[in-house]
Amino acid sequence: MPKVGIYSVFNFAECDLERPIFEKAGVEMIVCQNDDDYRAMLPEIDALIVANLPVTADDISRMGRCKVIVRQGMGVDNIDVGAATKRDIAVCNIPAYNIEEVSDYALAAILTLLRHLAFYDQSIKYRKVSQYAAFPIMKRFKEVSIGILGFGKIGQLLAKKARPLFKRIMAYDPFINREKAAELGVEVTQLDDLLASSDVISLHLPYTKETHHLIDRSAFAKIKRGAYIVNAARGGIIDDSALLEAIERGDVQGAVLDMTEEMEWPKLDNPIYNNLLIINTPHCAWYTQEALDTSRIVAAEEVVDVIQGRTPVGKLN
């Protein structure tokens, strides 16, 4: 009987959604609760499901039978895809399961920044300052330009939701679909133009070698003074130190960060988590009950697809 190993924070308490899928397919589940169990099961499993667990080249070298590794999410930077590919192991994500959630998060973040809601709240609670002029004067939404950096499914959905609210929507993506941009009323720009013209910049890029520190000191030097930044993508796309410097100079007026360079395991004494002009959230842009359930169900279905000789929808290599 084929075996699937599951080592995921989403499954420590239950596997009620996965169990009927695997029972019907004749697949045995091994659910791990700790690292020792995880390492012990690697040689005997035919498939692996993880959430944020790093799956290293060393882990993959011990997988004598494994045919597929599935991440319950979209980004797979926690998996050594190259090592898996060398051993002919498919790596899969869960495509498009959270695009509504992340685009909603980005829009909510933009509105919160533009109206200074969190900043006023923190000023009143922690600085004991209750003055509307405590922060720079705001603009009407109809006078605001939004720049979307990364124009895949999430960026496109954000543009669709934001278009009725704002004066101008711009997008930069080296692989942009110009027809889709035109359909959504979005201006296609170069990166430097987007930085210089946007009142709010919202990031929706994958984290790769090419996008590492895409928003660095040189980018902040080009940014429109007083702009805001929203990162609902991955940590590492923004140089956190450069962001703090830009905020201290007043070049950036505020930010919402769902992830930072510390990625999944943040040290909360880091200055990036202790600035009144930065709103931090715990990598929750994707998080609703519906998205969580979908990620678990589709992950199980992808395992069954591979074991039964079909190509899974989220195969990346």
Image: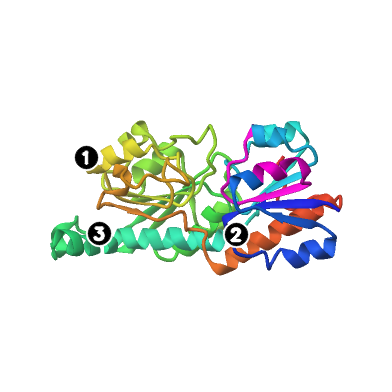
Q: CA distance from mark 1 to mark 2?
A: 45 Å
Residue identified by numbered label 2: 12
Side of 199 relative to 212 (left or right): left
Most foreground residue, 293 or 192:
293
Residue at 71%, 48% in the rendered image? 48
Q: Position of residue 269 (x, y in %)?
A: 31, 45
| Three-letter amino acid code of the residue under disc 1 | Arg
Side of 160 relative to 133 (left or right): right
Most foreground residue, 26 or 79:
26
| Secondary structure type for disc 2 | loop
Residue 40 drawn in magenta: yes
| Three-letter amino acid code of the residue under disc 2 | Phe
The disc, 2 or 3, on the residue closer to the chain's N-terminal end is 2
Residue 139 visible within the image:
no
Residue at 72%, 58% in the rendered image? 300
Q: CA distance from mark 1 to mark 3?
A: 17 Å
Q: Position of residue 168 (x, y in %)?
A: 40, 55
User: As displayed, is residue 303 above or below residue 82?
Assistant: below
User: As displayed, is residue 20 above or below residue 72?
Assistant: below
Residue identified by numbered label 3: 119
Q: Which residues are magenta?
A: 38-57
| Secondary structure type for disc 1 | helix
Which numbered tag is attached to residue 207? none
Residue identified by numbered label 1: 249
| Three-letter amino acid code of the residue under disc 3 | Phe
